[in-house]
């Protein structure tokens, strides 16, 4: 009977150090992590669209065909790059921390990891990643809810809500120019609100116009930071209410 490990794609076997088939010939000098690091370097420098099997192979002094010994497609290459870009979780839990503090710290650490490599949010997801570093982040996030009465599925779903918000917020900030492709954040220039004030009819859009005026008079703001704070606050308030309901039931 074929083992489950043997059915894994080769890149997963290599990342998990579970290779089932020993290949003949000399041991290759390049490892799966080297391939991921090369792809990350290209994406950091020139964007995700610059990453190709040929470009990664050239960066490592390999032919494109040699790269296929490790990954079978660009989709697999992206998964290796994602794992490399995420790295190990940048959070550790203290015994006295409550679950909300842990969940917020996890979310902010994830946001920082994504901002460090903004192209990550553009990688197409055809299936949930099951690579070591990505799953270590998931493990850390699920453990943030230790001490609550949430069931396992509820913990995973709660984590998915936080992950989805953070990922979408970084993507939107990147698209709007609030985050540069080098990961730097910038202050709002007020152009959005100024345009609304210039073109909006007060009779048709009274609430929007009032909001734009109030936002313009509120002083400097940073879309990325302000909306991350607000969004996390709303989600954590909701999860707090959910956890409180579980405790009372």
Image: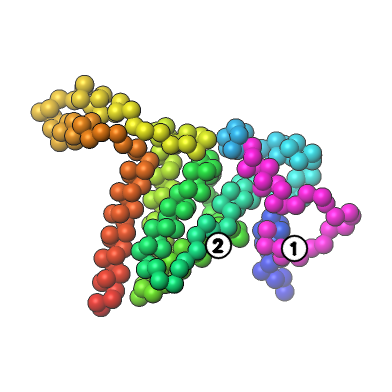
Is residue 66 something that shows in the picture? yes
Spot occupied by residue 84 in the image (x, y as percentages of width and height): 62, 50
Q: Quadrant of residue 153?
A: bottom left
Kindly identify the residue that appears in the image at 48 percent across and 43 percent down: 115
Q: Quadrant of residue 12?
A: bottom right
Q: Secondary structure at mark 2?
A: helix
The residue range painted magenta reads 15-42
Spot occupied by residue 168 in the image (x, y as percentages of width and height): 41, 46
Q: Nearer the viewer, mark 2 or mark 1?
A: 2
Q: Which residue is mark 1?
A: 19
Q: As drawn, is 242 to the left or to the right of 30?
A: left
Task: Evaluate if marks 2 and 1 touch, with contact meaning CB atoms under 8 Å apart.
Answer: no
Marker disc for residue 136: 2
Q: Residue furthest top?
A: 198
Q: As drawn, is 65 to the left or to the right of 131?
A: right
Near-viewer residue (94 or 191): 94
């Amino acid at each position: 009977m074929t083992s489950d490990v043997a059915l894994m794609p080769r890149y997963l076997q290599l990342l998990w150090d579970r290779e089932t088939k020993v290949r003949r010939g000399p041991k290759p000098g390049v490892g799966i992590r080297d391939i991921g690091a090369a792809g990350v370097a290209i994406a950091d420098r020139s964007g995700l669209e610059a990453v190709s099997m040929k470009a990664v192979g050239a960066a490592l002094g390999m032919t494109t065909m040699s790269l296929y010994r490790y990954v079978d497609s660009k989709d697999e290459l992206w998964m290796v790059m994602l794992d490399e870009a995420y790295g190990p979780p940048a959070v550790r839990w203290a015994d006295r921390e409550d679950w909300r503090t842990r969940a917020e710290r996890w979310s902010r650490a994830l946001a920082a990891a994504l901002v460090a490599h903004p192209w990550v949010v553009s990688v197409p997801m055809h299936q949930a990643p099951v690579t070591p570093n990505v799953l270590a982040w998931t493990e850390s996030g699920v453990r943030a809810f230790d001490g609550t009465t949430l069931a396992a599925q509820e913990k995973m779903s709660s984590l998915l809500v936080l992950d989805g918000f953070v990922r979408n917020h970084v993507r939107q900030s990147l698209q709007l120019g609030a985050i540069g492709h080098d990961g730097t954040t910038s202050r709002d220039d007020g152009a959005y609100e100024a345009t609304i004030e210039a073109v909006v009819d007060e009779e048709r859009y009274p609430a929007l116009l009032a909001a734009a005026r109030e936002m313009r008079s509120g002083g400097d703001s940073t879309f990325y930071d302000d909306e991350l704070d607000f969004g996390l606050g709303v989600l954590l308030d909701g999860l707090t209410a959910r956890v409180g309901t579980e405790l009372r039931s």
